[in-house]
Image: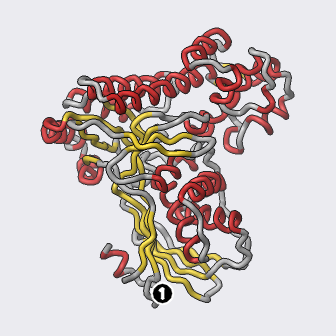
């Protein structure tokens, strides 16, 4: 990047470059942290860092975007990440700290890093996780350590939690394990990635609704994690399982040796649609209010008084089934595969909107416009509450689709019109994180 090469580099030439891509999740929203498989692909937009290694005893961070301020930290002090203040450099430091702890690095190498990002921030395309992954890769290389992509993905998934986001690992996994030209089914415990060939004759278009959502700065995301954790305990308890050791909805299914359809029936049978109070949950689980706060809630969800357990569990089990159906259609390539995949995407959006309540009016409007403009399927992607939609369009309709969405969603609003160029684009499956050396 010209910006990166022209950036004042503390008077040193870069020793190497590291990049980590963002991603678009085609289907499987909010289920990775419940233990279920997801189906993302990397996008071509990424986070890129130019790095020089030195004896300064400090890690110096600069960003080519002037709104992100420079930051310097001493290599000799413990790296601390402020959860209440999710600045860009703290995401970078999550990656540094994760590698330092995994590799037991007593003295980190001094380095100067200039960072540039082409992923729109807070858009649901995983710019923050890509930054953590890029930092992890940079720290490994600068300190002459060697880790596999699988190990790096697992480390970066864990260390992003330093900033307070309780994600499930999809974003970091696809950032490292992506391959150009293919989407991936990402499975957890153990982590593995399987190629998923997307149908010929269809194109995926990403459109940003231009409402930003920062997961670490708000509690929406972690409230959903907590609701799924409580639903897990309630379902386990109802079926006589030891609820104290179960944290994820997938674990209940495994313990019961049940199908996803059977789990959906169980949700209807055990959980009522009305929100649960803290008192009702404590009574059912036989725990104290103190245990509830310390064992089930996270730091930024202590204020929540009511929990929609039925709706959240119903979304998770039905969305997990949609992921498996999506992969099955891609594998078997039936004549009507584009329509079938579109239907699954539309069902996913409805579930995110109505059961998981992670959409927003602008995203719903955008998805509606995308469908009216020729998409066979359209859904929010990423955490939601803002950010992007992903739409599947028959190849021959792409140009008319882009024009129709431009005219209906972006051009009538001056702010959106100004952002349109980087907000509406065709996306092909990109490659994974990588290191490049000078020369």
Q: Nearer the viewer, residue 80 or 320?
A: 320
Disc 1 on helix, strand or loop?
A: loop
Q: Position of residue 257 (x, y in %)?
A: 66, 20
Residue at (64% x, 23% y) in the render? 253
Q: Give the class, few, some or many, for how many residues have Cα within 10 Å of label 1's Cα (few <14, many ≥20).
A: few
Place residue 146 in its image quadrant: bottom right
Image quadrant occupied by the C terminus: bottom left
Q: Is residue 287 above or below residue 92?
A: above
Q: Is residue 84 visible?
A: no
132 in relation to 361, above or below? below
Q: Residue at x 74, y 31 (%)?
A: 246
Looking at the picture, how far across and down is residue 348, in whole percent? 42, 27
Q: Quadrant of residue 381?
A: top left
Q: Which image quarter is the N terminus in?
A: bottom left
| Residue drawn at (24%, 24%) of the image | 335
Q: Residue at x 48, y 34 (%)?
A: 29
Residue 393 on image: x %, y %: 23, 34
Q: Tell me if 198 is positioned left or right of 23 in this view.
A: left
291 vs 58: above or below: above
Q: State the residue in front, 52 or 418.
A: 52
The residue indicated by pointer 1 is 10
Furthest residue toward top: 269
Residue 209 visible in rendering: yes
Question: Of 180 and 409, which appears nearest the observer?
Answer: 180
Which percent across, then down, holds residue 333?
A: 30, 29
Query: Which sits in the foreground, 160 or 274?
Result: 160
Please, which residue is most extreme toward the front here? 332
Q: How many marks?
A: 1
Applied colour scheme: secondary structure
């Amino acid at each position: 990047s010209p910006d990166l090469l022209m950036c004042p580099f503390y008077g040193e030439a870069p020793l190497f470059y590291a990049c980590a891509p963002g991603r678009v999740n085609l289907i499987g929203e909010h289920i990775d942290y419940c233990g279920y498989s997801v189906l993302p692909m990397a996008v071509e937009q990424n986070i890129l860092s130019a790095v020089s290694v030195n004896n300064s005893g400090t890690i110096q961070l600069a960003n080519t975007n002037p709104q992100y301020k420079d930051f310097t930290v001493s290599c000799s002090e413990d790296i601390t990440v402020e959860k209440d203040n999710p600045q860009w450099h703290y995401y970078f430091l999550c990656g540094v700290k994760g590698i330092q702890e995994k590799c037991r690095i007593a003295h980190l190498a001094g380095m100067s890093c200039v960072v540039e990002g082409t992923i729109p921030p807070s858009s649901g395309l995983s710019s923050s996780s890509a930054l953590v992954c890029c930092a992890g890769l940079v720290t490994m290389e600068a300190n002459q350590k060697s880790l596999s992509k699988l190990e790096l993905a697992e480390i970066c998934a864990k260390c992003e939690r330093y900033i307070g986001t309780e994600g499930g690992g999809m974003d970091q996994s696809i950032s490292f394990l992506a391959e150009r030209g293919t989407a991936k089914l990402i499975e957890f415990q153990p982590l593995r990635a399987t190629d998923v060939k997307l149908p010929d004759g269809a194109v995926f278009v990403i459109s940003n609704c231009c409402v930003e959502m920062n997961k670490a700065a708000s509690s929406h995301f972690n409230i959903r994690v907590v609701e799924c954790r409580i639903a897990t305990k309630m379902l386990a308890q109802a079926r006589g399982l030891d609820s104290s050791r179960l944290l994820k909805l997938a674990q209940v299914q495994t313990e019961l040796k049940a199908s996803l359809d059977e789990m959906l029936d169980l949700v209807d049978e055990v959980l009522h649609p009305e929100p649960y109070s803290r008192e009702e949950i404590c009574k059912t689980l036989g725990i104290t209010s103190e245990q509830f706060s310390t064992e089930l809630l996270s730091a930024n969800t202590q204020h929540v008084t009511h929990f929609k357990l039925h709706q959240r569990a119903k979304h998770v089990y039905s969305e997990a089934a949609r992921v498996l159906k999506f992969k099955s259609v891609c594998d078997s390539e039936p004549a009507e595969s584009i329509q079938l995949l579109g239907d699954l995407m539309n069902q996913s959006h409805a579930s995110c909107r109505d059961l998981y309540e992670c959409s927003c009016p602008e995203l719903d409007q955008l998805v509606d416009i995308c469908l009216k403009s020729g998409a066979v399927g359209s859904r929010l992607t990423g955490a939601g509450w803002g950010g992007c939609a992903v739409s599947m369009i028959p190849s021959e309709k792409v140009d008319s689709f882009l024009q129709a969405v431009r005219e209906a969603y972006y051009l009538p609003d001056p702010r959106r019109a100004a952002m349109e160029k980087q907000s509406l684009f065709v996306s092909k499956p990109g490659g994974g994180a990588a290191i490049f050396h000078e020369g």
